[in-house]
Each structure stands twice: as C-alpha cells, then as structure tokens.
C-alpha cells in the first residue's frame, strides 16, 4: 500500500498558527507524509514540526521567485517536489495550512482516479463575491467572468487526488501562473477557470454539504451541525474529514479546539 502525502506552504508563521493543522491531522491517525514548504519560520517552530514528523523544506529568500507571493509559488514547489524520481504516493493533498483542521484522515473517501475539487457554500456564486469575481475578471476578462461567474466558488485551498492526477492538475494550473504577471488571487481565478471550462479531464467536484471537505467561510454559524462527539457534520449527517476556513467563526474555532489539544 502506497503512502499518502499532504503538502502545504507557510510564510512567517510561528508554531501556534501551524499547530492546529498538524496536530489535528496526526490525531486522525494519518500515517502518511506531511511536507511543509516554509519561509521565515523560526528554528523553534521547525523543531516542533519535526517532532510531529513533518518534513520542513526551508526556502531561502532568493528562492521566492522574484518576490511572488508564496500562495502562488507553492504550486511550483509542489510540482518540483512530485517530479522527483523517488516520489511515489497513492494520494496527494495540496492544502492551505493556517485555516484547515482535520476530523478524519483526509484521504478517507473514494478518489475515483480523479483530482478532487471542493465547492464553497453553493449559494455563494463567483459573481456574488467581490474578491473572486475581481480575481477572475482581472486574470481572464469580463467575457470569461460573464460565462462562468454563475457557478459556485471552488476553493483552490484544498485539492486531493492520486499523484498522476494531481501532477496533471499542477501542469495545467502552472501554464497560467507564470511570473512576472502573477499576483495573489490568480491561483483561485485559474483554478475556477480550469474546472469550469473543463480543461481538467479527470476532475470530481464535490458539493460543500456532500463531500469530505467543508469550506465554512461563507456559511452562517447557525447552519453548522455537530454530532454527539462535537464533530462537524454535513447535511447528510456525515463527519466532515477536513474543515477549511474554520477560523472565520471564532465560536467554531473554540468548539473544535479539542481536535488539536
């Protein structure tokens, strides 16, 4: 059985900001590899991460791709890491770090040989979000925004798939994320453009209330449901493997703090 891999990127974070992500992931029983690309973290933070069996790839400032945001350069780093000849994983997750918590192993669902993408709250369309609509318009123009802006937002912050499928996804994504004309937000714009213009052939798109990832940023706090153990569940009553943007709701952050205690 091949191991799975979770990859993320952090810049300037101390351990307190990374701890919920790593500790909650390890507490699910996840025994695969965790790799974090890091810029501007302390030796103490690196030490604590290594105690939790996290591979930390420290990035010198000169490797920051001419000042590009790490939210963009992370995809180049992921691609280079997976291209190494000794990399052979069953599943790969590309994920945000600061605002992600785990309740179950993130790979505990059927990947179906596809790259899995996850919608945010479905009532919030791209055109309803000033940031997402502006990112898409700025990158691809008004015609593209008008053509696909009626779709729900798909979040680039959580992507899961088999290694070949994730590598194909990264190849397509990076065709549009080349310096020097890349700014924060372009990753989200390109991601939504690719999936809604069907340029990713092996893609599975999961609804926010019917999949292993729930992105709660645009959900009202009174619509969040929990089981008897205090775990977040979706509309079907199933425990959500991965929670994204939990920190948008202070009460939710407090309620779920036991996941990384």
Image: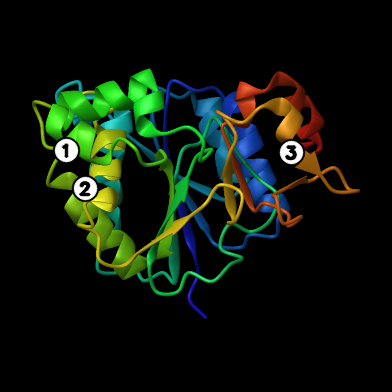
Query: Residue 173 has which mark?
Result: 2
Q: How many marks?
A: 3
Q: What separation in Å lies between label 3 and label 1 (alpha carbons)?
A: 34 Å
Q: What separation in Å lies between label 2 and label 3 (alpha carbons)?
A: 33 Å
Residue drawn at 31 percent across, 39 percent down: 74
Q: Quadrant of residue 244?
A: top right
Q: Secondary structure at mark 2?
A: helix
Pinpoint residue 89: horizontal percent, then vertical percent. 41, 69
Task: Name the residue beneath numbered marker 1.
Answer: 177
Q: Do residues under tags 1 and 2 come within 8 Å of each other at their CB atoms?
A: yes
Q: Nearest to the eye among marks 3 and 1: give it.
A: 1
Pinpoint residue 29: horizontal percent, then vertical percent. 70, 60
**Mark 2 crowd level (few <14, some 14–19, many ≥20, 10 Å Cα):** many
Q: Secondary structure at mark 3?
A: helix
Residue drawn at 54 percent across, 38 percent down: 121
Which of the marked residues, 3 or 1, is nearer the chain's N terminus?
A: 1
Q: Secondary structure at mark 1?
A: loop
Task: Name the residue beneath numbered marker 3.
Answer: 260
Pinpoint residue 8: horizontal percent, then vertical percent. 43, 42
């Amino acid at each position: 059985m091949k191991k799975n891999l979770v990859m993320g990127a952090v810049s300037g974070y101390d351990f307190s900001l990374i701890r919920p992500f790593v500790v909650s992931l390890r507490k699910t029983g996840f025994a695969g590899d965790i790799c974090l690309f890091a810029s501007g973290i302390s030796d103490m933070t690196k030490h604590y991460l290594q105690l939790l069996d996290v591979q930390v790839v420290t990035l010198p400032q000169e490797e920051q791709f001419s000042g590009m945001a790490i939210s963009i350069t992370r995809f180049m780093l992921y691609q280079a890491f997976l291209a190494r000849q000794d990399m052979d994983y069953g599943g790969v997750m590309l994920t945000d770090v600061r605002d992600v918590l785990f309740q179950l192993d993130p790979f505990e669902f059927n990947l179906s040989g596809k790259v899995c993408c996850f919608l945010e709250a479905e009532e919030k369309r791209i055109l309803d979000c000033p940031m997402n609509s502006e990112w898409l318009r700025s990158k691809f123009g008004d015609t593209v925004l008008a053509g696909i802006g009626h779709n729900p937002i798909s979040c680039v912050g959580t992507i899961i798939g088999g290694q070949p499928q994730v590598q194909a996804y990264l190849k397509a994504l990076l065709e549009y994320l080349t310096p020097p004309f890349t700014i924060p937000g372009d990753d989200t714009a390109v991601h939504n453009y690719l999936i809604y213009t069907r340029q990713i052939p092996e893609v599975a798109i999961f609804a926010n209330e019917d999949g292993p990832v729930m992105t709660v940023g645009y959900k009202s706090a009174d619509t969040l449901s929990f089981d008897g153990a205090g775990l977040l569940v979706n509309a079907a009553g199933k425990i959500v493997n991965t929670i994204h943007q939990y920190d948008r709701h202070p009460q939710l952050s407090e309620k779920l703090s036991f996941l990384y205690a």
